[in-house]
Amino acid sequence: MNPNVSDLISALSAWENVPNTDSQTPENLKELLAGLSRRPLPVGSLHRLWSVGELSTQIALAYFALWIRQWLRTAETRDRAVMETNLRVALKTCQRLSYLRGALMKVGQTLGNFPDIVPTEFAETIDHLHFDAPPMHFSLLRELLRSELGADPEVLFESFETKAFAAASLGQVHLARLKSGETVAVKIQYPGIARTIDADVRNLRALLFPVRLGKDWEYVQRQVEEIHRMLQLETDYEHEAASLRRARKLFTSGEGIVVPEVYEKYSTKRVLTMQYLPGVLLNDFLATNPSQELRNQFGAKMYLASLRMYYAGMNYADPHSGNYVFMDDARLGLIDFGCVQRYGDEEKELIRFAEESASGRPDVLRELFRRSANLEDVDFKNQEYIELLTESHKWTCEPIQHDGPFDFGNVEHLKRGIQLVIGLVRKRYTRSHPMYVYFNRSVFGLRALLYRLQAHVDVKTLHREEVRVPSGPSLDELT
Amino acid sequence: MRVDLQTKVATRNRILKVAATLFARQGWDRATTRSIAASAGIATGTLFNYFPSKEAIAATLISDALTKAKDEFEEGCRGESLEEDLFSYIWTGLRYLRPSKTFLGCALDTLLSPLARSSPDHPGDLIRTEHLETVERLIASHHRVRQPLSALTMQLYWTLYLGVLAYWAKDVSPKLEDTMALLDQSLKLFVTSLEEGASAFGDACSEREETNESQR
């Protein structure tokens, strides 16, 4: 397992300027987020560096402070201290990330998927990061649409709602009706985001400068490049449209998984018009107090969707609550394909090998670690490292090896996974194949969502039915 | 020989058209009144009957474009917020200024900079005055400001506007998206400062009224 899932999960510490946890009510948090929308976006790389640098420096200091404090406390108060400091850091991080609209908000969304890291109220408030990004007013939208599609929205569409009904980390989504009658969701990207991401990655490279002298710099560099590549792809809605078209072919109507249709005529690199899927998002679905049976059905669909795309060479790498629509007829809609990693031959070979490693055979595991974590012979002498990797691998395979429905609502399973990641981060075991940067994010993200859903899913059976190695349609065959 | 009005208008338009082409092709510095006159088929002295300087020609080109932009803006729907209206007004202007993009940056200093105003009939003055009148009207229509807008506020706005124009003139980003983002964020900053200033003033007035009331 690769520890790059979220560097912010590992940030644990007290924070000087963040209000005391005890006084942090859901109302305060909502006020905090509402206030952020009135703040101007920093322009220019230097200003963004200031924000990012300050955050990472404070996280590092906060982490160190907690490490010291932990020595001075008993076990009981230590847990409380961890919770308090997690909340402080997450709040501060929330503030920073929402402030820096753009790619960095993606990291903030990952935090929202781990309700055990922060109190429930905070997790729900963080969820608003998915949907309540600072809005673009209609004058800006009109000019964007005119620039991208060649005409005003009043001319292009039969109707176009001036208020956004959803926010994306890179822009926002509006409902519209085509002249042919279909109801569509029009996703419009904030101008200049792609260049903002390039600035973000330059900043990230600068912050990683101390790592350059370490032995793992080559691997870290490859991972940063992979992150850069994926973030750039996320700004390319034509790439997302292609992913949508490919994914749509993977599911039959009887399976209850819906991928929206793309309307090419109204889509460009910065505007994506797709079929609107009516339904509710996760929070609203949970508020209806659904039956266990319904939770399990949706959980199985979420897992199946990821699995099928995985074996078709597509990693649905951004599984957060804003990506899934729970439809009234129990169908599951998948609505965001901005972060889809496509696997080449090298990655597909790794997938095949990972399948074999589920057997647990030591020689196969060793080879998997060698390939996926770029281990050399000398690394296998590091007992602690190998044990951590082995435990992480076991954790990943646990639902697959479990007979019958696996209870994803068991918080201990999720906690154990996060603790393993923290363990690897603490030891700075950062080496891995670049594919695992997003693979681990998708594994954690999906399990966190299934945890919130409290779903029981027979993963073993799903895997048995879905494994198409070496037969079955591949991504290439589907295009 | 008397020249009739129609001929005068035609000559004026020809000068403007030729000047726009030469500014774009040769650049601001290299295009001279002599070369403009020659391309328009008139004597340099004749050109001065219509425009006293190269700056005056540029000012007219810009002013004509912004007048058309203002007409389009006035005919359109109003936004719900001051930010929306200001954005729409300015961006419509930029669309009409597109043919002037190559030379506008160079002309900004001599035409529109607050430091360039040397006389009441400075060619850039009309552009500035008309633009600020519209902006003041927009502000008044969206905000209940209890005081006349200060000269400092309008100077702040004008500096912001010139900054956007200068940035736009050099912007090579696809579909000018960087300028769009800059304009959006700059206006957020300006409107926020306006609102906070009005709010502070309102609080101060309320406090004074309460004090006066208690003293009675």
Image (spheres, helix red, strand yellow):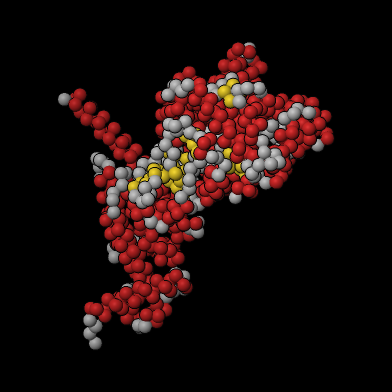
Q: Tell me which corner region of the image, top left, top right, bottom left or bottom right, holds residue A409.
A: top right
Q: Tell me which corner region of the image, top left, top right, bottom left or bottom right, holds residue B16.
A: bottom left
Q: Residue at x 31, y 36 (%)?
A: B199
The residue sitting at the left extreme is: B216
Residue B23 picture location, percent across and down: 43, 71
Residue A98 picture location, percent across and down: 48, 36
Q: Residue at x 34, y 50 (%)?
A: A158
In this view of the protein, which residue sits in the foreground, A154 or A38?
A: A154
Whether A394 is drawn above or below B143: the answer is above
Any part of residue A42 in sight = no
The residue sitting at the front extreme is: A254
In this view of the protein, which residue sits in the foreground, B143 or A456?
A: A456
Residue B155 picture location, percent across and down: 35, 51
In this view of the protein, which residue sits in the foreground, B154 or A306?
A: A306
Quarter holding the N terminus of chain B is bottom left
Q: Tell me which corner region of the image, top left, top right, bottom left or bottom right, holds residue A70.
A: top right
Instruction: Give the mark count.
Output: 0
Residue B10 picture location, percent across and down: 29, 77
Q: Residue at x 48, y 59 (%)?
A: B170
Decide if residue A181 is on the left or right side of residue A55. Answer: left
Q: Residue at x 36, y 41 (%)?
A: A163
Whether A353 is drawn above or below B24: the answer is above
Quarter holding the C terminus of chain B is top left
